[in-house]
Amino acid sequence: MVSSGKAKVCSTAKNGKNLILSYYLSSGIIGDIEFLTDEPKATTTIIALSPFSCLLVPLKENATYLKENTPFIKALGKGLT
């Protein structure tokens, strides 16, 4: 979860250009798509645009609880829409 700062999420296109997928402005959840699809590796790049802080939640120990936590899953869905 992003706690402060500003960052952008990019993906590299086949032509080598960076495509901006989204911006985080002191809020949001990073890794939501990877979490929901059980992908072990991210396919995007996050670039900090200012001093940036986020909270790390260890997935190995918490995945089962988080996937059964309806408010958390709803928050992920809202962020993806």
Image (cartoon, rainbow, N blue to C red):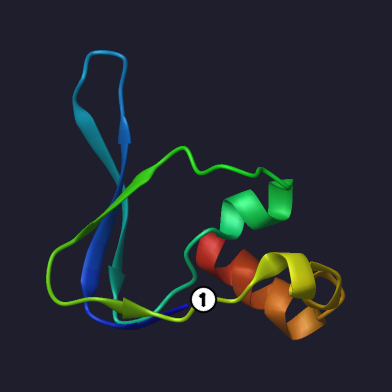
Q: Against 17, is 64 above or below?
A: below
**Is residue 33 visible in this depiction of the protein?**
yes
Place residue 61 in its image quadrant: bottom right
Query: Measured from the top left, where is residue 30 in percent x and y?
Result: 47, 64
Place residue 45 in its image quadrant: top left
**Is residue 81 visible in this depiction of the protein?**
no
Residue displayed at 21% across by 33% down: 18
As drawn, is 48 to the left or to the right of 32? left
Q: Quadrant of the C terminus?
A: bottom right
Place residue 41 in its image quadrant: top right
Query: Measured from the top left, where is residue 69 in percent x and y?
Result: 81, 81
In the image, farthest residue toward the top: 15
Q: Against 34, is 69 above or below?
A: below
Q: Against 3, is 41 above or below?
A: above
Q: Nearer the viewer, residue 3 or 73?
A: 3
**Neighbours of disc 1 within 10 Å: few (<14), some (14-19), many (20+):** few
Query: Measured from the top left, where is residue 11 in percent x and y?
Result: 34, 36
Under mark 1, the amino acid is Leu
Q: Against 20, is 75 above or below?
A: below
Query: Measured from the top left, where is residue 76 in percent x and y?
Result: 62, 69
Residue displayed at 46% across by 81% down: 55
As drawn, is 51 to the left or to the right of 42? left
Total numbered labels placed on residues in the image = 1
Residue displayed at 30% across by 23% down: 13
Q: Which residue matches tag 1?
A: 56
Residue displayed at 73% across by 47% down: 38
What element does badge 1 sit on?
loop
As drawn, is 35 to the left or to the right of 1? right
